[in-house]
Image (cartoon, grey):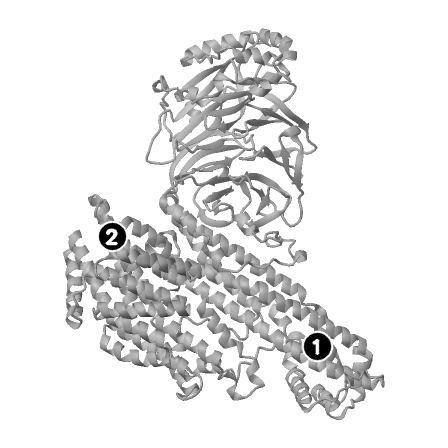
């Protein structure tokens, strides 16, 4: 939907341009639409196209012109996300300053995300709490929901998923109230994960039915991968109680979903997550007794693990 | 279990009517006391039980068709579907009004229909049902179409635009099954969207029944070979539908939304075309004529420029303006252009855009479903195809947007141009020019008009060859024409920095996220392209699901000349998951009724799979007299899960007194105590009428649940166990009689003087004798001999019976 609106806006100017001067298209709306387009492309893993749009913006709106900060922020956000995907947290951390200069709330939020990724839980928590209060004051609902989700993540990372639940429910209520479909799906994803940790994977799986379609439809590639990964985890967890032939079937299905998740992660070079997926697949193949496939996955894992040594976060505590 | 033997007086006549036209199909509403009839004149009639009074009639017309072949009610009784043979259309009609809510075409004439509802429950399904509301929350309501344009389809014309919702009905999946000639079977979810297309069944369908647990589909077909036709029973397994029920439901729901929206967009576009009038072309044609007739060398553009700059026109131009166009004509032209453009503009903004945005939303939801491969790939949903469809819709939106901009600039241009020309013409006539019009034109105005003239008044000889005109001043019409041609004057994208940038980019150009833009194509062209792509990706599941439906069982039944219009009869018992088939076998010029039953799950078997019924004797409740004769079964239909309503012919009875209406309780047919004795010993692979002796026969004797049909050559029956009524149709197809089958206590008290009451007080015993074949033979002979005598006795009883 967003894509359609952006393109409509861009073609909007087409017929007017003839009469007016050259500067006609250098409006804020044009810049916003292009930035949006760049972000959408980056989300879907089309980084070349995104950087091309940004380059164009750079030419069109020189760094000290009026609307330059629009693309600057957009550029840094994209770089930040890529750095996070790649597991280069120090790089992401260095970008935070730039983002903060352009948009303080966004900057603080991202700082917290980096801290969380670097396992500095208490600092992240402090920052997020402050941000939450601030955003609630400003009525910046979208950010409130994102912050709530991050806080919830902090809780289950510190192995207390029960405390995360009220946070998630609050986020869900907010996103439903403001018709934020995508954030709602994201929240449901987190809720399902909380349920998985709490040991009710069947519930989680049926909850996922509600959330997964919007995510697969319009979501960022990374989110799609996460969703599929979670589905696979839930399938494996609920297969534990099955009898043998049914269990094997469920595990096969999970492996298929993991493959899909892996494809998604590969599109955005998210090596860390690919490593997790491969590890998981190797374990499943092992259970099924498929040695050859298992060894292949294990080797892949070994390669990735040498590249990116694990930070000691257990696999289960990571959505 | 069996409630009627304790209180079951004979049936009461509640309505009788002679109809002017022959009835060819009749079916009761599943929920109300309404009966739908189709007659030879092509009318569809709805009658109410009370005195058989007519509620409405749907007259035959050119649009829908004139040859109604069959009818089916949606299980909730709110919609009636009927099939038309001449137009090959299926029309869905609201029970409240005789209006077509939706119609669609099929490949072949439909000979039978069955509309079923899914009864399976599961937690996943419930969550699917609940998730449905999302789109209503997120999308704006579609504005209704103008009244006068909506003759073709009434869905979108109502003030409260919940019509689509009404058409869709409950979220629970219901499927309309259509069957036609040469193995044509199609399944339509919600009666609107095709979800399966079955091929490979030979012959014309006579009856269809999809079990409500979605495990199998029963089909009866006939293959006619030199005069006689061979009738066979097929059972198709529909396991894919069963095991993917939540997914199928959700997909079908989305599909119906999408196809309804496509129809909406189509209608909006029709409205737009109607708003555009031929009069708008006047300017082009006038100017073309002028070019052909003038003998000067100066171009039209120059002539007008001359007028603009010097205020004087050449003689030719003056004649054109003053004599042909005239001041009045110019005014009129200006007005019609403005009104028609603004109405088109309104339609684009409010209808076309909101419609296509909803379409985009639903398609992207569908894409989300398709990317969940584990769930939807087996159903044939293809993510790549849907992605393409989304892009096509995006292109359509862009095109509509372009049209909007063209209208916008055209309106501006025409206004300025006409104002200037008007003043110029008034000056020529030396008329008084109104002071407000006579304001001095500013330099800017002059540049504007001059630019308009250069842009629009260029002579284009190549255009003349294509369209027979030199000019294309009017630029909106080209978008609305349903032609494959390129646009006559495509919009100028030069100078648009977005397109420039896109052209020069290397990666972005190939981005799958961008919607392609067809600068040279008309709106119609882009719409058609979009429709084709969407159709294609929605078609795929129908093929995949259709292919998955394998023929599991084939039982040849009998060979006969075709005689009954909706016999054999199929029934699905929802609680015990059984398919029942009622049919008759011709044996010694008598029709013997047989009941075949099968489990809906093909892997499971059921006892007493095939049984024949012999009607032994009927006892008059009042006199204890017994009527014995040989009966031939004319028609039979399931009344409810436990009862079959049968019309019998007494082979020796006097005319007018030889037809009987009987309620046959199945619990007695499938008596558990001695069911082991009634096993079919033949084989299902040879035709059943060739192995009559192998079919176990149960002889039934009735004391109650039957009635003589006086002075009526009854032939057909339609029962409705929900409202406890039956309708009997005579063999000349014009005489109907309606019975109340189960009379409540109140009525019995009212009519306490009636003979029936005595009967109801007596303990009821249905004698049911078990006779071996040979014994039955003997009895039959005896009964035949006795029959005439008894008939005479019966006559005397008549007045009392006719209550």
Q: Which residue is most to the bottom?
A: B310
Chain ID of residue with mark 1 = B
Nearer the camera: disc 1 or disc 2? 2
Q: Indicate which disc residue A215 carries.
A: none
Residue wearing tag 2: A198
Picture coordinates of residue B619 (x, y %)? 53, 11
Front residue (pair B642, B625): B642
Visible residue check, residue B204? yes
Picture coordinates of residue B400 (x, y %)? 56, 69
Residue drawn at 66 percent across, 19 percent down? B711
Visible residue check, residue B658? no
Please tell me whether residue B109 is drawn above or below residue A208 in the rendered image.
above
Q: Quadrant of residue A102?
A: bottom left
Where, quadrant-wise, is the C terminus of chain B in this rendering? top right
Where, quadrant-wise, is the N terminus of chain B in this rendering? top left
Residue drawn at 61 percent across, 65 percent down? B347
Q: Are marks 1 and 2 on the same chain?
A: no
Please tell me whether residue B787 is drawn above or below residue B396 in the rendered image.
above
- In space, the residues marked 1 and 2 are separated at their CA atoms by 75 Å
Residue wearing tag 1: B284
Q: Quadrant of residue B476?
A: bottom right
Q: Residues within 10 Å of mark 1 (few under 14, many from 20)?
A: some
């Amino acid at each position: 939907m967003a894509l359609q609106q952006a393109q409509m806006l861009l073609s909007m100017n087409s017929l007017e341009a003839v009469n007016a001067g050259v500067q006609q298209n250098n409006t804020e709306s044009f810049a916003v639409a292009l930035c949006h387009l760049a972000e959408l492309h980056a989300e879907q893993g089309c980084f070349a196209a995104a950087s091309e749009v940004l380059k164009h913006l750079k030419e069109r709106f020189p760094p000290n012109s009026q609307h330059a900060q629009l693309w600057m922020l957009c550029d840094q956000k994209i770089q930040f996300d890529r750095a996070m995907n790649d597991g280069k947290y120090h790089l992401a951390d260095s970008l935070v300053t730039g983002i903060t200069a352009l948009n303080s709330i966004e900057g603080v939020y991202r700082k917290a995300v980096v801290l969380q990724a670097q396992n500095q839980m208490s600092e992240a928590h402090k920052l997020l709490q402050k941000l939450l209060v601030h955003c609630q004051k400003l009525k910046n609902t979208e950010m409130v929901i994102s912050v709530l989700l991050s806080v919830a993540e902090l809780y289950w990372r510190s192995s207390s998923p029960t405390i995360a639940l009220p946070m998630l429910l609050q986020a869900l209520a907010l996103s439903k109230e403001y018709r934020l479909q995508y954030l709602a799906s994201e929240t449901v994803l987190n809720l399902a994960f909380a349920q998985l940790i709490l040991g009710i994977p069947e519930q989680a799986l049926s909850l996922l039915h509600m959330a997964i379609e919007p995510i697969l439809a319009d979501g960022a590639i990374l989110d799609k991968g996460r969703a599929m990964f979670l589905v696979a985890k839930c399938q494996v967890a609920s297969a534990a109680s099955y009898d043998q032939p049914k269990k094997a079937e469920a595990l096969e299905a999970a492996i298929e979903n993991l493959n899909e998740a892996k494809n998604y992660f590969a599109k955005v070079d998210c090596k860390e997550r690919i490593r997790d997926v491969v590890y998981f697949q190797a374990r499943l193949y092992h259970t099924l007794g498929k040695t050859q496939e298992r060894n292949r996955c294990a080797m892949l894992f070994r390669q990735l693990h040498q590249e990116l040594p694990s930070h000691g976060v257990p696999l289960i505590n990571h959505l | 279990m069996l409630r009627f033997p304790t209180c079951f007086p004979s049936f009461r006549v509640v309505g009788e009517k002679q109809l002017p036209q022959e009835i060819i199909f009749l079916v009761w509403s599943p929920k109300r006391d309404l009966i739908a009839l189709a007659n030879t004149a092509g009318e569809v009639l709805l009658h109410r039980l009370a005195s058989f009074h007519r509620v409405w009639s749907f007259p035959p017309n050119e649009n829908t068709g004139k040859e109604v072949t069959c009818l089916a009610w949606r299980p909730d009784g709110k919609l009636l579907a009927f099939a038309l043979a001449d137009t090959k259309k299926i029309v869905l009609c609201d029970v409240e009004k005789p209006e077509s809510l939706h119609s669609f075409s099929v490949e072949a004439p439909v000979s039978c229909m069955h509309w079923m509802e899914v009864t399976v429950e599961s937690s996943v399904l419930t969550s699917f049902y609940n998730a449905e509301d999302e789109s209503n929350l997120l999308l704006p309501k579609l504005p209704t179409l103008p009244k006068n344009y909506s003759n073709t389809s009434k869905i979108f014309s109502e003030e409260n635009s919940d019509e689509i919702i009404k058409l869709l009905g409950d979220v629970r999946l219901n499927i309309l099954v259509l069957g036609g000639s040469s193995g044509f079977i199609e399944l339509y979810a919600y009666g609107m969207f095709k979800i399966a297309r079955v091929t490979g069944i030979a012959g014309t369908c006579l009856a269809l029944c999809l079990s409500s647990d979605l495990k199998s589909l029963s089909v009866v077909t006939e293959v006619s070979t030199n005069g006689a036709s061979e009738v066979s029973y097929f059972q198709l397994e529909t396991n894919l539908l069963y095991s993917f029920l939540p997914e199928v439901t959700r997909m079908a729901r989305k599909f119906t939304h999408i196809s309804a929206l496509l129809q909406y967009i189509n209608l909006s576009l029709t409205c737009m075309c109607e708003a555009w009038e031929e009069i708008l072309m006047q300017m082009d044609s006038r100017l073309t004529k002028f070019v052909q007739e003038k003998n000067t060398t100066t171009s039209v553009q120059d002539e007008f420029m001359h007028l603009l700059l010097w205020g004087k026109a050449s003689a030719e131009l003056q004649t054109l303006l003053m004599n042909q166009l005239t001041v009045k004509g110019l005014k009129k032209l200006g007005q019609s252009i403005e009104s028609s453009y603004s109405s088109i503009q309104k339609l684009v903004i409010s209808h076309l855009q909101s419609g296509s945005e909803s379409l985009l939303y639903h398609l992207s939801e569908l894409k989300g479903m398709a990317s969940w491969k584990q769930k939807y790939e087996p159903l044939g949903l293809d993510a790549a195809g849907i992605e393409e469809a989304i892009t096509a819709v995006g292109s359509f939106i862009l095109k509509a947007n372009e049209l909007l901009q063209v209208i916008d600039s055209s309106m501006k241009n025409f206004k300025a141009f006409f104002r200037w020309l008007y003043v110029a013409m008034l000056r020529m006539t030396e008329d008084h020019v109104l002071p407000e019009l006579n304001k001095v034109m500013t330099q800017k105005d002059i540049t504007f008009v001059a630019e308009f003239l250069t842009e629009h008044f260029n002579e284009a000889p190549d255009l003349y060859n294509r369209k027979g005109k030199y000019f294309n001043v009017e630029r909106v019409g080209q978008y609305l024409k349903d032609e494959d041609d390129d646009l006559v004057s495509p919009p100028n994208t030069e100078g648009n920095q977005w397109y420039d940038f896109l052209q020069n980019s290397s990666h972005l150009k190939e981005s799958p996220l961008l919607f392609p833009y067809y600068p040279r194509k008309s709106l119609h062209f882009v719409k058609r392209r979009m429709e084709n792509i969407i159709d294609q990706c929605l078609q795929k599941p129908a093929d995949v699901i259709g292919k998955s439906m394998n023929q599991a069982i084939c039982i040849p039944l009998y060979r006969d000349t075709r005689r009954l219009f909706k016999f054999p009869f199929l029934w699905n018992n929802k609680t015990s998951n059984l398919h029942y088939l009622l049919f008759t076998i011709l044996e010694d010029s008598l029709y013997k009724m047989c009941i075949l039953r099968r489990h809906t799950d093909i892997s499971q078997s059921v006892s007493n799979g095939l049984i024949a019924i012999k009607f032994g004797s009927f006892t008059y409740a009042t006199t204890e007299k017994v009527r014995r004769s040989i009966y031939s079964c004319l028609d039979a239909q399931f009344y409810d899960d436990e009862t079959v309503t049968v019309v019998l012919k007494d082979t020796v009875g006097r005319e007018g007194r030889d037809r009987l209406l009987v309620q046959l309780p199945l619990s007695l047919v499938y008596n558990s105590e001695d069911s082991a004795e009634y096993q079919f010993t033949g084989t299902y692979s040879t035709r059943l009428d060739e192995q009559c002796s192998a079919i176990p026969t149960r002889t039934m004797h009735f004391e109650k649940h039957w009635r003589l049909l006086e002075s009526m050559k009854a032939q057909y029956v339609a029962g409705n166990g929900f409202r406890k009524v039956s309708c009997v149709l005579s063999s000349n197809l014009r005489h109907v009689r309606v019975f109340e089958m189960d009379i409540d206590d109140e009525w019995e008290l009212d009519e306490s003087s009636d003979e029936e009451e005595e009967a109801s007080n007596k303990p009821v015993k249905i004698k049911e004798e078990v006779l071996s074949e040979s014994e039955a033979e003997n009895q039959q002979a005896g009964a035949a001999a006795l029959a005439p005598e008894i008939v005479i006795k019966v006559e005397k009883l008549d007045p009392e019976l006719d209550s």
